[in-house]
Amino acid sequence: MMASGEYPDAFALTENFKSKLLQFANDGLLTDLSPYLDKYPNLKNVMPKEAWLPVTQEGKIWAIPYNRHDGFTQVVYINKKWLDTLDLKPPRTIDEFYEVMKAFTEKDPDRNGKNDTFGLVGNNDLTYGGRMFQAAFDAESYKFRDNELQPPEITEEYRDYLGFMNKLVSEKILDPEWPTITGAIFRQKINTGKYGMFNGFWHFASGKEFADGVMDNYIAVEPPLRQDGTPSTFTYNSTNRHYIAIPQGTKNVEALLKFLDWAVSPEGTRFNFLGIEGKHYTEAGGAFQKTSTERAALHWAFSLVKHGLLNDEVKAYMKTEYKDAVIDNLTLATSVGTLDKVAAALPYYPELAAYNLPKIAQEYTAKTILGNEKIDTSWNDYVKKYRSSGGDKAIKQWSDWYAKEGSKLN
């Protein structure tokens, strides 16, 4: 559609396609929105400044973000029933987490007399099960060292994380089937009641994704403390769900921006969450009640834009769908989440698309965690391969950009 030159007035692209959006911007196909925003107080003042970072380049803004109120998604779940059975306290340090997972694996916490439990379950990219320790080893964010902006996958912190995860595999604490576990299989495994710990979405506590009563056995806690004893955080490259961009040549840009500005106003926010009063919900004394269990198509997830604020107003709307304890988990996830502003703001470099650096990192991660490669003898070669396969060029461009723009992110 964009190649044809027959553009819509606006279009949406999810966060996963941000690079495509920035490619359109580099090709001169989008409207720079920065000259307009002073006229729209909600977009300018209510939308968090960090939400604009992924679509801002050299002062130009190429889209309106849908900033998620649950942009920080992750908490750690621990089987409270098993803690009580084994007379264990919720762990705080990495070592304590290890000891608890080991006990969950070896001490028959479900008391069935069989060796059939695991301390940890993860999926095939370890976004479930692994991120809690990647966070604890501070191995999720970019680091500026030796005058270079280094991606997390080649830092010493990442090496320590891989070593720890390999230990969990070698001792059969982590379910060995993790490389083949998809999201659906992950949920099936949790339903078996054979797992002691994992990290996952705050809304898992609602039980809607699992069999009845399964999540009643789990409590949500913070990720392990870092090795120096300081709190760790889950790190995110963005808290946006999608973006609405306006092609170059759209005639009535301001009418559309006025509409989107309304979407992040108090009235628009209520509509986004609840729909139309009297049709989709009712209000009495500041409490809201949905009139139907069906979500209204016009106001659910991918419609319009949101400001992403998890304030009392938003929590009141969420109570029409979630219990207080589940919303408390979202509050916890928000408190233990942080945005890597560097990753969020990194410019789009089209020439780097030819290098498949993520694949190199993913392959090495899987091999070392499984024990097919020894970290002590292969780490330096891996870093050399990463750098020689386009990594040095990428790091040079990232570092040059950071030298100019990094101070503005603080």
Image (cartoon, rainbow, N blue to C red):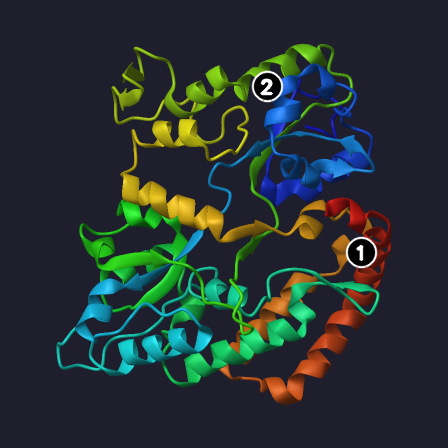
Residue closer to the observer: 159 or 86: 86
Left-right relation of 397 to 243: right
The spot of residue 15 in percent (x, y) is 59, 41
Q: Is residue 262 above or below residue 337?
A: above
* Residue located beneath label 2 in the image: 260
Q: Amino acid at mark 2?
A: Leu
The spot of residue 112 in percent (x, y) is 13, 77
Left-right relation of 7 to 336: right
Q: Are there few (<14), some (14-19), or many (20+) residues within 10 Å of tag 2? A: many
Residue 180: quarter of image: bottom left
Q: Is residue 200 above or below residue 101?
A: above
Residue 232 seen by the camera: yes
Left-right relation of 249 to 343: right
Residue closer to the observer: 184 or 46: 46
Tell me the CA gap for discs 1 and 2: 33 Å
* Residue located beneath label 1 in the image: 398
Left-right relation of 133 to 190: right
Q: Is residue 5 above or below residue 350?
A: above
Q: Given the current orientation, which residue lies at the most extreme front position?
A: 229
Q: Is residue 275 above or below residue 22?
A: above
Q: Amino acid at mark 1?
A: Trp
